Amino acid sequence: MQRIFDSKEDFVDLFESSCQTLIGRTYEDCTDAERFQALASIVAAKSRAIGVKTNELAQQEQKKKVYYFSLEFLIGPLLDNYLINYGVRDLVEEGLAELGLSLDNILAQEQDPGLGNGGLGRLAACFMDSMATEGIMGYGNGMRYRYGLFHQAIVNGCQVEETDNWLERGFPWEVRREQSSVIVTFGGKPVRHEDENGHFWFTTEGGDRVKAVPYDVPVVGYGGETVTKLRLWSAEPAEENFDLDAFNEGDYAKANKFRSDVEAISTILYPNDAGPHGRILRIKQEYLFVSAGLQTILRTYERDYGPDWKHFPDHVALHTNDTHPAMCGPELMRLLVDEKGLEWDEAWDITTRSISFTNHTVMPEALETWPIPMFRSLLPRIYMFIDEINRRYLESLSQDRDNWQELASQTAVLWDGNVRMANLSIICGHSVNGVSAIHTEILKHDVLKGFYALTPEKFNNKTNGVSHRRFLREANPALSKVITNAVGDGWMTNAEELSKLEQYADDPAVLDDIVTAKHEAKKRLAEYVKQVSGVELDPNSVFDVQVKRFHAYKRQLLNVFKILDLYNRMIDDPSFRPMPTSFIFGGKAAQSYTFAKEVIRLINSLADVVNNDSRVNDVLRVAFVPNYGISNAQIIYPAAEISEQISTAGMEGSGTSNMKFMMNGAIMLGTYDGANIEIADLVGFENLKIFGLRVEDIERLKAEGYWAWNEYQADRGRLGRVVDELVDGTLARLNGNFELVHDELMVNNDQWFVLADFKPYVQAWEELRQICANPREWAHMSIINTARSGHFSSDRTIREYAEDIWHV
Ligand code: 26Q
């Protein structure tokens, strides 16, 4: 353990002087926000110093480096995480208390950098944490967006997107590394050169030169021994082209255009369903962070090993998080061929041995493609490499295979006027992985079956994991204490040690402690919900939670139907009194995703109806937590008793909130999808509830013909009534009826099988709800879930990547 403070006194001295030197006031006169700045700056400075040592050591030992390329890193607040990882949280808390200050109040000041959409971005952050903890030299390579994913406000039931100005008060963890800036060129004209041996290469003439400036954020592993870094790139003009004439004429926008055009590249993070708008900027982002990252990596490699390129893959692994960094392949080829003078075959061998790729989704509309004309004019030299990669690939295909035309239509990079980024990622790498067992099977036998037929050895599964240090230890101190009292604290670095808890599964004292810890967390969440949404929740009711991005396939709508049905039954039959339950939702919808935004409005309308109806509101409550993100997720997970994981089977890559809830002892109510299946395998069907259609059922229904109308007719009394209520005024108080939602079911034939799964879902919920009525029975199941959640630590996932893919 690398303790950054020798003693409490040592910390207090440092803190007092940091307030003086950084803020210019005594700690007493500082605000909590300023105290946060002072404390974070000490921890950041210590981290940078340890980072230098980590780096020197790695260089001496010639340790292999892993570069994790991701357009998203949803890192969350860092201070608490780092204090825990350095083992000084208690010491700091006590030291501050002696000064009359509260660590919790200071921690609450930290901004949450929203540099990601959801699961994929958070996974990247968990991986950074686990790599550092496992002593792997893992470096993140991403973008420093000026504005994070929007801040979500709820106005009159509707989502309203507000700018997330996360840098407003500065970001104390980052350091701008001006010296390490690199130039990235867009457009221009490739010019061919040839030497006397016929060897040729290209340079680019003209084009727009952009300066990519890195900002480094320390990544502290548990124990503080290994500190690596996350490098985030920002776009700036390469030359000052201030238009003085325009300025003198008073046209300030024109005068500054050179700057604003370039800075637009790193201004915002794109939502996961971005329409055609802004697509050019998106490609620019993708190329900027890929090119800047790779240029830097080659420079570092050359410094450490000289121009010995053929051993590059022995010392460097390049991992691409989804297709967003797919240009790694052609850009590495360009650097090796055009700038380092390698022949094609040699460069290709190095490229494919270095790059690996993770796919996160099977939805066809999520697979990135770019129109060739647009791509070529923006990145002409990269396009030439892609064209040649594609040509050589098809050539080898046609030599080896009889059915090559069919395979080509599935696997070619250039097809139908588009560049297909997933195919590019697979061809340029040595490994393709899915994020749960079932997802990988679907990739192999459906979405990517052509590639699987050709190169089965490239395919492997890496079931996701999450940082149990952040989502259990940090988020849920009360439960963590119960665990550590029972089994010691070895689980912090070896999550499998959580399994020792199982011997207490029938121990009344420990079960009571579990119930007490849950109750504490529920009280805390209830306070938070009251503060942010005005809804009052009773901590004695059961907390049933669904928090995740809003998407039709995640079926928040199914959950709404369950609640509405419960409401209807209570209104019809006043003697029907279900046990008190609070239904809690949270999540953002992409700004242009109308259906998803309507479901948010629907939940808020339902909340408005239910919470204000005195016939039901003593036992039913519905709350929507606005602006779901890492910070409030850490308040939400610990408080849940029921975890809703109800995606249409076959659609969810893995899901990761299912794992975070599991660690915190919530019982899952889920479909047989993504990592839910592996969770069920581990805890057994008796310790959670699985319901509904499975992948094969859905395939059969699709083949035989599924008719939403039949489902509606077959149960007019309950299901049919709920469908009708979308448009009959029942829920219209906040901005009207829900025709769009209704028509998705009844006109568009319910693509996500909401109506088909309604009955088994309600049934499974009733059964689970019965269990929750008996706290001891619930606690028994809960402790088994926590005890078996060690498998879903991202430490395990990272060890698998390290061994099977990166070979470190
Ligand atoms: C693509 C093109 C243009 C603009 C945006 C995008 C884009 C951005 C983000 C496409 C997809 C994403 C994010 C996807 C994502 O978060 N997928 C989730 O990944 C998790 C981690 O593996 C899984 O657990 C989830 O199942 C999966 O939905």
Image: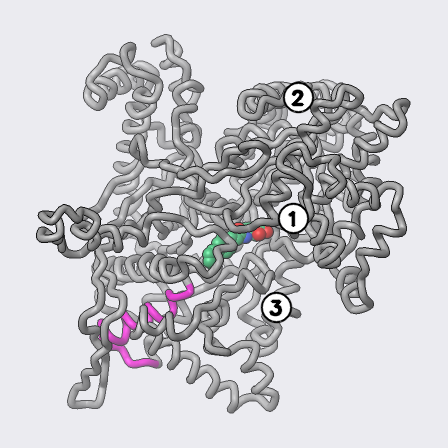
Residue at image point 28% right, 45% down: 215
Q: Give the residue at mark 1.
A: 554
Mark 3: secondary structure:
helix
At 34% from the left and 23% from the top, the residue drawn is 36
Q: Quickly name the residue at label 3.
A: 447
| Residue 554 inside the magenta-drawn segment | no
Dot label at residue 537: 2
Amino acid tagged 1: Lys
> Label 2 sits on what residue type?
Leu
Residues at marks 2 and 1 touching, judged by CB atoms closer than 8 Å: no
Mark 2 nearby-residue class (10 Å; few <14, some 14–19, many ≥20) = many
| Callout 1 secondary element | helix
**Residue 441 on image: x %, y %:** 65, 64
Position of residue 266 relative to residue 362, above or below, is above
The image position of residue 395, as x and y in percent, is: 46, 88
Q: Quadrant of the N terminus?
A: top left
Sequence-first disc among 2 and 1: 2
From what the image shows, is residue 291 above or below residue 235? below
Q: What is the magenta range?
A: 326-344
Q: Picture quarter containing residue 312?
A: bottom left
Residue density around tag 3, few if under 14, some if 14–19, many if 20 or more, within 10 Å: some
Disc 1 residue crowd, few under 14, some 14–19, many 20+, Cα 10 Å:
many
Under mark 3, the amino acid is Val
Task: Residue at 27%, 11% (x, y): give it.
Answer: 29
Reading the chain from its start, which is encountered first: label 2 or label 3? 3
Residue 328: x, y in percent?
A: 37, 65
